[in-house]
Image: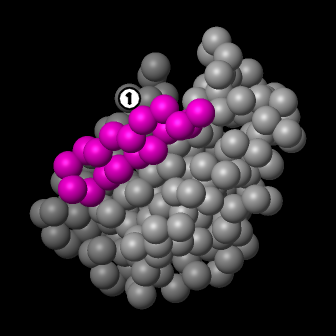
Amino acid sequence: MDEYFLVLRSAPDDATLIPAVNESVEAMVVILRSVFLYDHSARRDDTFTEHHWREQTDGGVTVTLVDDVAMPGRYLRIAGGAPQQRQRVWKNLAVMLPVVSVEELRRVAREPEEVPAVLQHLALAVNGSFDQETLDVVAGALASARLEVRMSAAAAALLLGWTALDPDLNAALAAEPTAEGRRALAHVIAVRASRRRM
């Protein structure tokens, strides 16, 4: 696994999250004997802010707190470094921070009309591990009566990358009543196809 994700239980205006992540990442010096330091933050327009902590070794693990207003949600991305170290950091942060479980995300995602972004959160939280229940939830949402839910399901399908979703995406594209939805679905299908050719 090249990267891991943890969906965090945090309100967008929660000012305590960055210090909590900082404390947890700094605790890796005791737990894993790895020193992480806050590296920088980056803001991409008004919808996306990242805070980066880097392990102080050549090619070390990077922990990134993403505050994604467009999705919306806050999550951690753990990337880089040796695969075993990356997994250890992910597992330790999962018990140290307020993480939303895959099971809870699946439960909420079964009725995504109230919070369509839960589909994308679920796609991140499963960390690429295929499971039929998540596939069924995303496939069902692609047929929702609400455009916002269908678009979130398409974004989730893009994040998941599972070929088992191809028939559902193609059916959703064929049935999509809006031009906006057809453009978005066609884009998702094209990006998924191009990633497979790489």
* Left or right: 135 in relation to 133: left
Would you place residue 167 above or below residue 50 in this image?
below
Mark 1, residue position: 194
Amino acid type of the residue tagged 1 in the rendering: Ser
Extreme residue in the left direction? 179
Query: Do we see residue 43 in this rendering?
Result: yes
Report x, y in % for residue 35. 71, 30
Q: Position of residue 10 (x, y in %)?
A: 53, 71
Percent position (x, y) of residue 90? 73, 45
Q: Up-down: is 193 above or below 23?
A: above
Q: Nearer the viewer, residue 104 or 139?
A: 104
Q: Residue at x 16, y 69 (%)?
A: 178
- How many labels, in total? 1
Using residue 129 as the reference point, say whether residue 148 is left or right of it.
left
Q: Residue furthest top?
A: 58
Q: Residue at x 38, y 29 (%)?
A: 194
| Residue 142 visible (yes or no) | no
- In which quadrant will I find the N terminus? top right
* Front-lying residue, 157 or 62: 62
**Res 163 → quadrant:** top right
Position above or below: 33 against 75: above
**Residue 50 percent across, percent down from the top left:** 41, 45
Image point (67%, 65%), residue name = 99
Residue 69 is one of the magenta-drawn residues: no
Prevailing SS of the magenta stretch: strand
Q: Is residue 181 above or below residue 190?
A: below
**Label 1 residue SS:** helix
Nearer-the-camera pick, 169 or 24: 24
- Residue at the image position 52 percent from the left and 42 percent from the top: 64
Q: In the image, which residues are magenta?
A: 37-53
